[in-house]
Each structure stands twice: as C-alpha cells, then as structure tokens.
Image (cartoon, grey):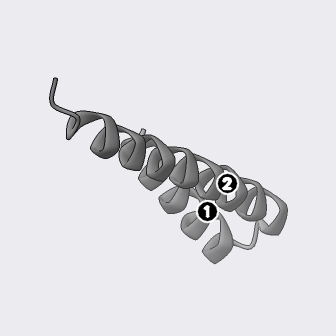
Amino acid sequence: MLRWTITFIILAIIAGVLGFGGIAAGAAGIAKVLFFIFLILFVFSLITGRKKV
C-alpha cells in the first residue's frame, strides 16, 4: 500500500509540474488517503503483533 502512495505522490508532482492542476490535486488526495490507511494498518499490526499468548 505504501508503494501505491508513493506512486500517486510522484504522479501528483509530475502533473503539477506540467500544469494539470485538477489531476495533481486528485492524485495528491488519493495519496493522502492511502497513506493514512497504511499508517492505521501499521499501528494496528504493531499493537496486535506485540500481544503474546
């Protein structure tokens, strides 16, 4: 999932440099959402992974 986030950030940067503002904003928004989902899943896996039975 982090790989998709990086892909959308790079797409947003390239689109912003080329002047495609709408596409850049959309890609940046998708990257932001994916990053927060990744962050939540990462924290969840840290919490559940430390639990020893």
In the picture, the disc for residue 27 is 2
Give left or right: position of 32 versus 4. right
Residue at the limit of the structure toward the front, as seen here: 53
Q: Which secondary structure lies at badge 2?
A: helix
Mark number, residue 12: 1
> Residue extending furthest right?
22
- Residue 19 placed where, x, y %? 74, 73
Q: Check disc 1 and give the amino acid type.
A: Ala
The residue carrying pointer 1 sits among few (fewer than 14), some (14 to 19) or many (20 or more) residues within 10 Å by Cα, namely: many
Q: Earlier in the sequence, mark 2 or mark 1?
A: 1
Q: Is residue 14 left or right of residue 29?
A: left
Query: In the image, is 22 to the left or to the right of 7?
Result: right
Asked if marks 2 and 1 touch (Cβ < 8 Å), the reply is yes
Q: Is residue 41 above or below residue 12?
A: above
In terms of depth relative to the viewer, which is nearer, 3 or 38?
Answer: 38
Dot 1: element: helix
Kindly give the residue lying farthest to the left in the view shown.
52
In the image, residue 53 sits, relative to residue 23, either above or below, namely: above
Judging depth in this view, the residue of 26 and 16 nearest the camera is: 26
From the top left corner, tell me how far across and down residue 25 is, in percent: 76, 64
Front-most of residues 40 and 50: 50
The residue positioned 71% from the left and 63% from the top of the image is 24
Q: Residue at x 55, y 45 (%)?
A: 37
Q: Residues within 10 Å of mark 2 (few under 14, many from 20)?
A: many
